Amino acid sequence: MSEPSARSATPGRLVAISVTLLVLLSPFLWLLQMSFKSNDQILQFPPPLIFTPTLENYISLWHSAFSASFVNSLLSASFSTAFALLLGVPAAYALSRWAGRGKHALSFAILVTRMAPPIAFTIPFFLFYRWIGLLDTITGLVLVYTSFNLPLVIWMMQPFFDTIPVSLEEAALVDGARTRTVFTKIVLPMVTPGIAATAILCFLYAWNDFFFALILTRTNARTAPVAVVNFMNYEGWEWGKIAAGGSLVMAPVLIFSLAVRRYLVSGLTAGAVKG
Amino acid sequence: MSQGGIEQERRSFIAFALTPSLIVLFAIAVLPAIYLVMTSLTPFQLTTPGSATDFSAPLRNYDLLPGDPRFVNSLLVQAKLSFWGVLFQVLIGMALALLLNVPSRFVEFARTFFLIPMVLPPIVVAVIWKLIYTPDISPLYYAAQALHVTMPALTSSVDFALTAIIIADTWEWLPFTFLMVLAALQTIPDEYSEAALVDGASTLQIFWYVTLPFIMPILVISGMFRLIDSVKAFPLIFLLTGGGPGTVTEVTNYYAYLLAFDTNEIGYSSAVTVVMLLLVCGISLGLVWMGRRRESMS
């Protein structure tokens, strides 16, 4: 293969790429190394680059209220993902087969929910929850996250259904199978990779949320992102704990999102550009 | 089963599969919007009973907006934050994409790590920059101290607070424009630049006359995406500056948040939010239109 000189991996370019990557990630690495330092080491000047890592920050987090908020995050993200898939996957299938006008209305609905500033939904949700007593409950969070993940599921799943030939279903239908059976027994098993990728993205959106959790929860249902911030407000000098809390919150995200990086773009641009 | 029976059974399945989702979409997209507009027509405060249904002076909130210096200022702050943030994200993102657009197993592996800032939870990004901007523990201030330079406290300085937010926001969203531009670069046929090379074009000329026209649409689209999303920049401002010092970093979104959940002016906050929503809707519609036009062209 002959490559033009502008597009070849020269050693100089590889070095430039490595240096850029290191500079770009240095703020992130700084947080990571800080989470393994004791408070004395953090405040030491000049900062020791080589030190004996300690797990004391993580251990004290484990024994604090932070572990409860971590569980809250896990619960609300998992349940909302499950519900959004339960509602959205059949809808995506129906839209894929039925096609036509519905798609434009759908992409507009997705735009509204994705693009509108969260505050536009928070005020109505807050007042409604306050009225029916859903403030500071996991149920309330699950409801919000489910509704915001539903358009994403429909958007992400449609192309997967589009790739399955209709003739396959028609053959089974002629043999007397019901549409429901065809859907669950033939179509669904063929789109499991798509469902897995969509599920991970939904989980990440719910897990990453800060704004809704900040306003709709107080103490009982507080999620991990909000708990990290609370370390900052009330225990302002425990930088080690803050760094460890931040590292814990980002751990699942890093693992999952690297697994679905191929779908990241279409998930992020849902609604306007074809992924 | 007869042909008509299959058709009918199919139709009832489709209805069964779609209805729940349509109801939920209606409940989250349409109802809150109606509720928000209704509330924006009232002087609603949680502590004042009856104020939620007081429609005696429906346009009062909207009349107040142009004369509210904090609201006008918040629009200006938002415009500055969006303009510089989007500009840097598109330019640096493009530069990164050009740098990484080489066929190599190592580079392909490295690309994944360039995505990290974007996938981190936004609040963790805010924590990371809080550590960078806090003098006692920041590598930035250690370096300044070692060089005997005095650095101002960035996030509490009138001159640098907004810049500090723009830097953090650019860092967080660079990977997005990078990813979009890289995808576009990879669709350019190699023959184009090869032909230009044979004709004696310089690297800069190839970029200007071959590459740039090719990636222009994606630069505009990713810029618009970032523009819409930049309105949401909440965790960074919440954690780094709290809108301050004064109102230097108070964007409209943050002002609406303070109004509703700090000073309890829910009716007025709703009016601010409605105006913001209209602006975002306008940009979004432009984006849909551009996306369709691009689709019909290809």
Image: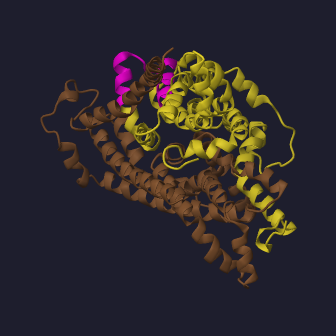
Chain colours: A yellow, B brown
The one of A142 and B138 positioned closer to us in this rendering: A142
The residue segment tinted magenta is A124-148
| Relative vertical location of residue A61 with respect to residue A31 in this rendering, above or below | above
Magenta region, main secondary structure? helix
Q: Seen in the image, is A81 located left or right of residue B182?
A: left
Classify residue A22 by image quadrant. Answer: bottom right
The one of B107 and B68 positioned closer to us in this rendering: B107
Image location (x, y in percent) of residue A180: 55, 17
Image location (x, y in percent) of residue B195: 72, 77
Residue situated furthest bottom in the rendering: B200
The one of A60 and A6 positioned closer to us in this rendering: A6
Image location (x, y in percent) of residue B30: 34, 33
State yes or no: residue B295 in magenta. Answer: no
Please give the name of the residue rendered at 72% of the width and 82% of the height, measured from the top-left corner: B202
The one of A272 and A18 positioned closer to us in this rendering: A272
Please give the name of the residue rendered at 29% of the width and 55% of the height, measured from the top-left corner: B69
| Relative vertical location of residue A44 with respect to residue A206 in this rendering, above or below | below
User: Does the rendering let one see residue A148?
Assistant: yes
